Image (cartoon, grey):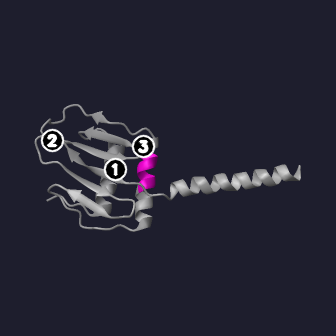
Amino acid sequence: MRRIIILAALLGGVCACGSSAASTTPHRIVFGVAGGNLVSYQVTIEPTGRIRSSGPFKPRFRQLSRAKVVSLSRLVRADFAAGLKSRLCPGTNPDFGSDFIQAYGRTVRVHGSCEPRFHRLWDALAQAVGLRFG
């Protein structure tokens, strides 16, 4: 009986380590605007914290701390897990592109402003890298 208790405790410890490691593993996050008649752009936050961009808007920062990347990864994962979905908002001008966030093997696109949770996440990413408009 004692062996079973010890094995159960060891198994619980291994499971706990695995779940905490997953929550601290940063992932690549790509976000930006694509489609429409305007110039598209994207920003990539690498797991190392390095920031790359393409298009007319350039982030102010070139590198984020590991803690910041882990925090952003958790935020994206939580919103994706909570059911964040692509949306085409009614009445949106087709000349404007769709905002997108790509991570964890998924891409969520929103064309318009009818998804506040998506835009809070997108704005948090833009603010983290120091993206300026205008």
Q: Point out residue 92 in the picture as x, y percentages from the top left corner.
A: 18, 35
Element carrying mark 2: loop
Mainly helix, strand or loop, the magenta region?
A: helix
Residue pictured at 41% horizontal, 64% vertical: 68
Q: Residue 99's x, y, as percent?
A: 25, 44
Quarter of the view holding residue 133: bottom left
Q: Earlier in the sequence, mark 1 or mark 3?
A: 3
Upstream in sequence: badge 3 or badge 2: 3
2 and 1 marks in contact (CB < 8 Å): no
Which residue was labeled with disc 3? Answer: 80
Q: Would residue 82 be counted in the magenta stretch?
A: no
Type of amino acid at the residue the image marks with label 3: Phe
User: Which quadrant, please, contains the C terminus?
Assistant: bottom left
Would you name the residue on which mark 1 appears?
120
* Residue ID for mark 2: 96
Tell me which numbered mark, 2 or 1, is placed earlier along the sequence: 2
On the rendered structure, is 16 left or right of 113?
A: right
Give the alpha-carbon distance from disc 2 to disc 1, as whole Å: 19 Å
Few, some or many residues within 10 Å of mark 2 (<14, 14–19, 20+): some
x and y, in percent, of residue 55 in the image: 16, 55
Residue type at tag 1 = Arg
**Callout 2, which amino acid?**
Phe
Q: Give the left or right position of residue 11, taking residue 99 as reference.
A: right
Q: Is residue 77 magenta?
A: yes
What are the residue bounds of the magenta stretch?
73-80
Alpha carbons under labels 3 and 2: distance apart: 24 Å
Q: Which residue is more in the foreground, 72 or 53?
A: 53
